[in-house]
Amino acid sequence: MFDFWPALPLFLGALLSAALSGRARAVAMLAAPALGAYGLYQLEPGTTVTLQLFDYTLTPVRVDDLSLLFGYLFHLAAFIGVVFALHIKDRIQDVAALAYAGSAVGAVFAGDLLTLFIYWELLALTSAALVFARRTERALASGMRYLIMQVGSGVLLLAGTLIYAWNTGSLDFDFIGLDAPGGWLIFLAFGIKSAFPLLHGWLVDAYPESTPTGTVFLSAFTTKVAIYALARGYPGTELLIWIGALMTCFPIFYAVIENDLRRVLAYSLINQLGFMVVGIGIGTELALNGAVAHAFNDVLFKGLLMMSMGAVLYVTGEIRGSELGGLYKKMPKTAILCIVGAASISAFPLFSGFVSKSMIVTAAVEEGYSLIWLALLFASAGVFHHAGIKIPFFAFFAHDSKFVGTAHEPPANMLIAMSIAAVLCIGIGTFPVFLYGMLPYDTGYSPYDITHVLTQLQLLAFSALAFMWLKLSGIYPPELKSVNLDVEWFYRRMLPVGVQAVLDRAAPIDRELRRRTKAAIDWGLNDLARHHGSYSGLGGNWPTGNMVLGVAALLGVSLVLYYL
């Protein structure tokens, strides 16, 4: 029987999109994720495909409930992203997007670390192409920095894999843990792609510089593959609880003062990843269900928000909050769809974020992590400020901008893609049983009880009142044309300046070393010429008799040494 490789339809779709054009290319791109999802539907948990490499058994395909959930998610995200990008006539973006989705699908079905590494690096290359595709100097520079970080993650993963395989004799990708040989290196590799604190700069640096459609794909795959990898290899690692709590909190302060609305969403993405990391760190069945369910929902509502801001950028050519406003008059459909995404990410009851985020918060309470619970509540209120209110308010309402006169709704395919995501956000939030049925564990959790609903409504109400009070009192940070310094400043500015300063100070030493080296070489060459040149004693013509006498003397010395 033919072994189905889940990533194959998407890679074939990428090849066809490179060869075809026009309507045929659009059909091929839409068919690839649809056929891939149908292929997944035919797979049964427990299915594996194995290969033998020397003394190691590779498992390029390993099917279980966790990999199936992410497989369906990535095919759905690829389909929505393709619909959103149908108006684009850019072969590079089309090929890179489907190959990127295929790499993500391959990674979550990889049953061994070597196969995971191959897809891990393919993720880096294909996603970087979506940043380069914007074809601006800023995009090129950001794409190069992004690629360096992603390849660096791959190097750490490969190093950890080699150490792990050498000490354990296995390449199986299951629970690893920090105590395993090479465990810290693999953990750090996953942490880079998960945007751990101090390792997150690549995300807020590169994602906002991608194309309006490319950012939608970027928000869906790389970080979610990393979340899957952590859930597979490091569940129950307590360090993740504290890392995740920090991830939920610190981006709020950056997002509130950020002017670029896509960069606001990039910080918001880190905030949501923090909830997932906390759930993985807690490691109970409820917490892991919450983490992977929130990953599923985040792809939808974050994709919806990225699509709405991509539509604004496509129509106006502007994405700074200080320059936008009043667009609801000319883009009412886009504004409504954006509000659906904002309500979902803010975890309003009956929207998707509520049914997954509440699981993680409940798990933190049940396991006695009181400080973490408070941090998650603070983060939930904060995300309502910067993503639930700030994004739609400054983009569509705030004040009438200069774009109101010329703005219009984006192309129909953009609206269709946003509508699909919006319907899913409302559908999952209203009927969570369908998502819960796909989760790895059956915990019997129900989000719609009085405690959960009232707590969340109170939190959202007080958060909205805080925003109104801060705005009316003039305390809320205004939208300014500014650049906010983040951790990437160290390698974007400080590192180049530091290297240049070292080179400037080393220049005189370098010149002196070069001068002395040249003088020493010249002296040596002159000395050789004096002793061995054509007019020297050793290099001149000697009589034949003298030469024979010299050879005889050497032979005599050799015989004496031999017999001694």
Image: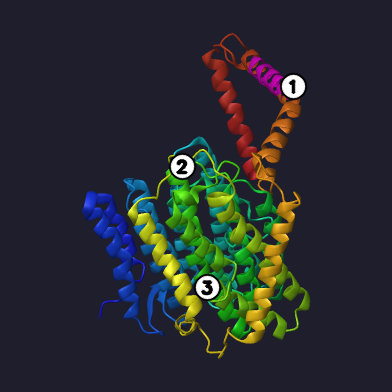
Which residue lies under the disc numbered 3?
Answer: 351
Q: Amino acid at mark 3?
A: Phe
| Residue 509: % across, % down | 75, 25
- Screen quadrant of the N terminus: bottom left
| Residue 247: % across, % down | 67, 63
Residue 316, label in figure: 2
- Screen quadrant of the C terminus: top right
Residue located at (35% from left, 51% from top): 411
Q: Earlier in the sequence, mark 2 or mark 1?
A: 2
What secondary structure do most residues of the magenta stretch adopt? helix
SS type, badge 3: loop
Residue 512, label in figure: 1
Residue located at (59% from left, 13% from top): 533
Q: Earlier in the sequence, mark 1 or mark 3?
A: 3
Answer whether residue 362 is magenta in the image.
Answer: no
> Which is closer to the viewer, label 1 or label 3?
3
Q: Crowding at label 3, few (<14), some or many (≥20) Cα neighbours within 10 Å?
A: many
